[in-house]
Image (tube, rainbow, N blue to C red):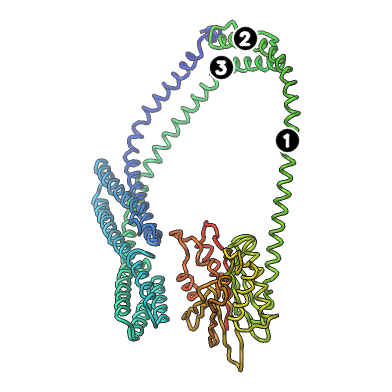
Amino acid sequence: MRNGAFENLSIRIKILLSLSVVAVFSFLFSRINVLGIRQSADYTNTLTLLRSFEGAIQHRDEFQTKYSLIDCRNTEYFKTLSSENVAQYFFWTDSAVRILQHTVVALEESGKLNENREFKVNEIKKGVLASFHLFNELRDLIRKRGYVQYGLEGELRDEAHRLEEILSNGTDLLLQMRRHEKDFMLRGEQQYIDKFNTRFSELLALRQGVEVKERLIAYHSLFNEFAKVHNAIGHTAAQGKLRDVLGVTERTEKLIRTMVLEFEEESGFVLSRIQLTMQIFQFALLLVIIGMIWFLGKQLSKPVFDLRNALDSFVEHNFELAAQFPFSNRKDEFGRLSLSLQKMADEITITFKQYRKRSEERQKVLKEQKDKLEIQKLLLQENRNLLQERHDDIRQSIDYARRLQNAIFPRKEKIDRWFGTKHFELYLPKDVVSGDFYYIDEVEGTKYVAVGDCTGHGVPGAFLSFLGFNFLNYAIKDKNLENPAAILTYLNAKITEVFNQNGFNSEIKDGMDIALLAIEEKKGEKRAFYCGANIPLYLIRQQSMVTIRPNRFPIGDVIDGQRKFTAHELDLRPGDRLYLSSDGYQDQIGGPANKKYKTVYFRDLLLQTSHLDYEEQQKMLLREFREWKGANTQIDDVCIVGIGI
């Protein structure tokens, strides 16, 4: 076929001719290699099934481990008894059984199921079934054990709280029983069961009412049942049902890996020989394809480049046609494309001239609109600058208030001189400034410690905290009042006077909760005098806590002496720890159920961390608060002071 005649053939025919050459060679290539492909298919299919089975078992074991490590410590699981990990475990177990059945069929059809492999397959089947039954038994035990407020652990918590509410004496023994209960949950050691039973016997021997004894016996029975189930589960992988499950799983995985390695070694030689043959013919096919690409590129690329150059020239000449498009006389697709481009260029030239004229007219209108927009933009920027200046002024005022508030607190050097290392102050304002404050000072040998919680937070609370701090300081240093009850009476009178609560404006109920502690030493013995308005005193002595109750009314609510503040006297001993706290820590929303932290857990936290030094205890309290709060917003100011004797 002459070159001109070939050029006039359509692009489709040229491509079909080229592809026909490649197709003929590919057909020959496939026929030559079909025998080798069939030979390797049996090995590849069987090996794929074995690896899929191994993968299914690994997925199953992964979800079994996730269930044991995650769901067992997830209250949501015990609430619904629904677990995606358990569902995935069952899914992958069923998948593994089905894959194993297909693997046995493939081995039989290919004649590769010898006695040794048949024995291993049967052992693997037994292992999968045994692991499944052991997992179900482990799951039943875990559900029975429960977590936090669910199952036996939840019943233990509830029973302990009910007992705590009705117990009249022996609260320290009950707290020790609860601590042994938690130690056993964490470590699973028999010594904590023995300690729990010993404390139970001691508490039972005390003179208690019938209801207390019944609750105590019920609490003891629940703990023994919980310990039995906990030991049956196994505290580590080397104990109980966990050990049985992991043992069967390990043996099964070892057999599977052995079969996979055998097939990989056996099929390696056959597959490598087949791959070498395929590579030779693939190289030959690649040479043919490269030749066809070169041929088609030579026949098709030149017309494309020439047409592109013609279009570039049209654009460079400002959309005015300088010459006719090439290939207009050809009968193929390039000829038809050239004629279409020629027509399009003529229309663009006419349209572009009309566009220039309209564009000049529009530019004039746009210029007028732009001037108006510039004026509006300047006005907006001026308003924005004014708003920013006002925002900066307000922010600077609040920052200055924060510095003023921090300045009234005692410096750490003074507190260290009075209490050494036996103190900490945890102060976390909700906003920049706080409605909580703490007061620590020494006057003529008597040390005064106070924590105040004013109405509200932010700027209003901070204003009231300034008043409370100054009135308290004046009562102690200028009025020379020593008794905490007298000091709070004076503080109440001043707050009431400031807000005119005795007059016509009696509907205002601004005030504060406060606890005041006075510590004095005479003849080598230390005593503390405590008085509180809605804030208790916590005393920890020898790993036991005593709560000194406050007056149940705030500062600013006592009118005309209708209520009296009560002072409590305490004899102090070396090693005693005293804590005062506002309610911001206990009221914080968070945790798994997004609820308040509660006072009972706050008291437990103080008791559990009381063996630490004061700096470490402050860090533990801060860490627990942040973990409990999580992503939630802090809802109130937090102020905690701890003092040691």
Left or right? Give the position of 394 relative to 453: right
Q: Earlier in the sequence, mark 3 or mark 2?
A: 3
Determine the secondary structure under disc 3. Answer: helix
Q: How far apart are the alpha carbons under marks 1 and 3?
A: 56 Å
Q: Among all residues in the image, which is located at the extreme front? A: 504
Determine the secondary structure under disc 2. Answer: helix
Query: Looking at the picture, does residue 424 appear above or below residue 115?
Result: below
Give the percent coordinates (x, y) of residue 69.
40, 61
- Give the residue number, with chain letter if any, for mark 2: 342
Judging depth in this view, the residue of 23 and 568 nearest the camera is 568
Left or right? Give the position of 10 relative to 168: right
* Identity of the residue drawn at 41% across and 70% down: 186
Give the percent coordinates (x, y) of residue 167.
37, 79
The reply to whether callout 3 and callout 2 are in contact (CB within 8 Å) is: no
Determine the secondary structure under disc 1. Answer: helix
- Give the residue number, with chain letter if any, for mark 3: 300
Q: Among all residues in the image, which is located at the extreme top? A: 329
* Identity of the residue drawn at 39% across and 60% down: 75
Give the percent coordinates (x, y) of residue 263.
34, 47
Q: Residue type at mark 2? A: Gln
Query: For residue 377, which numbered disc appears in the image?
Result: 1
Q: Residue type at mark 1? A: Lys
Bin the neighbour count of mark 3 within 10 Å (Cα to Cα): few under 14, some 14-19, many 20 and up: some
Q: In which image quadrant can residue 324 be found?
A: top right
Asked if residue 243 shows in the view, the reply is: no
Judging depth in this view, the residue of 436 and 317 nearest the camera is 436
Left or right? Give the position of 284 relative to 351: left
Bin the neighbour count of mark 1 within 10 Å (Cα to Cα): few under 14, some 14-19, many 20 and up: few
Q: Residue type at mark 3? A: Leu
Q: How far apart are the alpha carbons under marks 3 and 2?
A: 20 Å
Q: Earlier in the sequence, mark 2 or mark 1?
A: 2
